[in-house]
Image (tube, grey):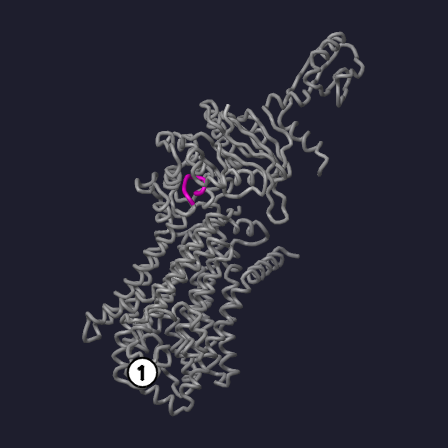
Amino acid sequence: MKTMISLSNVHKHYGPTHALDGLSLEVVEGQAHGLLGPNGAGKTTTLRILLGLARADSGIVSILGADPWSSGASIHGRLAYVPGDIVIWPGLSGGEFIDAIGRLRSGFNLARRDELIEAFELDPRKKVRAYSKGNRQKLALIAALACDVDLYLFDEPTDGLDPLMAQAFRDQITQLSRSGRTVLLSSHVLAEVEAVCDHVSIVRAGRLIESGSLSSMRHLSRTTLIVKLERPAPDLPELHDITRRDRTIQATVDTEAIPALMNSLVTYGIETLEVRPPSLEEMFMQHYREDPAQ
Amino acid sequence: MSAQVASAAAWSHMARFRIRLDRLRILAWVVAGLFLTTMVAATWDSLYPTAAERLSFAATLQAAPALTALLGPLQAPESTGGLTTWRVGGIALLLMGIVTVFLVVRNTRADMTTGRAELILSGRLPRRSVISAGVAPAVVLALGIGLACSTGLGFGGRGWTGALIYGASLAGSLLLFAAVASLVAQAVNSTRGANGLGILIVTLAFIVTAIGFTRDSSVITNLTPFGWMSNASPYAENRVAWALLPWLVAALVFVASIGLAARRDVGSAWMRETLGPAHAARWLSSIPALLWRVDMSLILGWIFGLFALSLFMGYLTGSMTQLIQESPQIQELMNRLAADSSASSITPLVLAFTALGAAAYPISLLLRQAGDEAEGRLELLLSTPSRRSRILGTRLIEVLIGSIVLQVLVGVGVGTVAGFFADSRGQTLVDSIGYSVVALPAIWFIAALTALIVAAIPRLAWLSWLALAWCVVVGELGALMNLPEWTQRLTPYWYNAHWPLDSDAGPAVIMIVLASAMVVTAFVTFRRRGIPS
């Protein structure tokens, strides 16, 4: 599989701020890759470096097989980008903005544009200054999604969208992944990344903390288990963070220890059993709790 | 604390907060007003030191319809105070009136369009405070300018009565413009539109008054603040009622405007937002096309605005040229006003003035580029296959073509109207275009300087306005204030070629070369630097 994006030990300073502190990241073709992190973690800086808008102080950066800083705009024909924060020219109508920006990119598809305008319930005749924040965000989304390119970059794209429209956005991303397009989605909304991404990289303070497929990361995290037993059981070695109420035990368990645990539990008679796979939320919180740096 | 007291405290906090945010702006304009008034007054001292000389100067003005058109009748020719208020009163009110409009709109409508008003009104403030606190900086500006002009003239030994009448008249008229601007800000739903309509109202009042003065029609001049200021007659009749009239009207308009704000939805407008096209026109498919689409209203606004001004200037030029040819004394005054002492016509003077205004066109256009960068639009454009040089290049082509069109049109406007007063219309037109076009290298020089700043350090882009302000002060007032010659040499306008073209065009060519070098440097820096978020 082709590597679409690769950063290796990238540093970036803005004055005294160390925005990227040796960040490494790899996105291969066909991935829907979530870039997760709290505000100020370096997500936007990463995207700006990938677009050639900012230059990495050190480290190796490559996007679509080229160095974004020196190759300039030539690689931009194969990507579409949605910024997180934009003040659009107020005199344009929404439709004019979508078309004008879309036509600057490659593969702008009119049928697809109309489909998206409908999916996002947008009135394209309004002047840009008359749109609400969420509707302005839709303009940038439609101008990107209506283009058939290899790589899509999104910087916190659902900020300002209502839940229905955020769902519409997720449907679009799922469609893109199915057709083999590569997506890099920067977000701090865990549910969103969980819903549409198959790979996740977690960044914090300009460093990569964890990266992998969603399933492999679940593997690293503990499953939550709530079990009601017929006979009282002792604290089994596989169980962690145990809380008891009568004969009900709530605890966490390492995923690979589940088969052994089940064999032990059966001997005490299982009345009811509830197993919850680890959510990204839990992984995320775990990573931030465990990081000793801050 | 009762709710009303709390609300009053919150209002005064908001008003003071707004004044503090704008304090440097206000201070700069007040100082400029004081400086201009005292300098012009001092000029009369040196031009016509005795009352007899001043009276004989006034006699030559009797047959000068053009000067009275712009400035109104000269009512107190024997005093330097009267000459000063006559010379600068109308112009000061016009310029400061425009400044007042900007100040009111930026503190009212701009808040409503950006959503700051919602944030502020969610505090303990009534709806009307959008207007009542928003006009506070403009009120301070009006009072400050009135006070500065009064004290400047009073302490200058030019008589306190006239000084106070003039100051009161000026401050009251500015208050009235502030009140009108607060109505406009509620009527128009965009900041740019409100500024435009406000400026249009102030300028129309000025032009209508000028027409009234030439026709000697008190019906017209009794209707506008410009006419009221003339009616107040500082240093002559000193009519208190006319000086206080604008205060009364301003108070009434303020009450109406604040009352409206209390009754209407915040941010609503009388002018409805119109719908635009659902899809872009076919031609809107490249960087040049997109930038032309978003810059079009600014470019056409400059072209129409300056062309309209040039028609008015042409009228002044024509009628004054006639006058100068008949009066040696006016000719002497003109020589003092012009750097070039051989001027026999004021055409070059007028076109030097419009050429200064025309340099504001590239600055305002290139500052759009800095705005696009600051607000993230440049980032979006650069994420497409568009090259940086194409974006900067498009804007520079708009500057180049726009400035040529502007200068030629202004020359045509002045020359055509002035031609009606002259014997040889064709020659007047050709000369007028010539005088206008020779200023292009200076305009390009300022444009190139702006481009360089915008390309290299966009957050310092406002410095280019400072450069132009320097050219205006030195170019328009330098000769009058006896500034040393080296100050003239520090403006690009000094190096313009002379019309008709002679062998002295070398400096102009050097300026074009320097401008080109700055443009090349701008492209290189812009291509190499990071785009900060």
Residue B105 in the image: state x and y as whole percent.
46, 58
Residue B450 vs residue A99, the one in the foreground: B450
Image location of residue A293, percent across then percent down: 71, 37
**Nearest the camera: B296 or B378?**
B378
At mark 1, the secondary structure is: helix
Horizontal and vertical percent for residue A241? Answer: 75, 23
Q: Amino acid at mark 1?
A: Gln
Instruction: Judge by depth and name the residue closer to the eye, B400 or B324.
Output: B400
Q: Is residue B258 above or below residue B41?
A: above
Answer above or below: position of B253 versus A100: below
| Residue B385 part of the magenta segment | yes
Q: Residue at x 33, y 57 (%)?
A: B402
Residue B109's place in the image compared with B318, above or below, is: above
* Screen quadrant of the C terminus of chain A: top right
User: Which residue is depicted at the point 43% across and 46% down?
Assistant: B388
Residue shown at 25%/79% (left/top)?
A: B322
Residue extent of the magenta highlight: B381-387
Most extreme residue toward the right is: A234
In the rendered image, is residue B186 in sight? no
Picture coordinates of residue A65 (x, y %)? 49, 32
Q: Is residue B318 magenta?
A: no
Q: Please indicate whether residue A228 sits to the left or right of residue A163 in the image.
A: right
Q: Residues within 10 Å of mark 1 (few under 14, many from 20)?
A: many
Is residue B127 at all visible to an observer of this figure? Answer: yes
Going by the image, does B56 lie left or right of B112? Answer: left
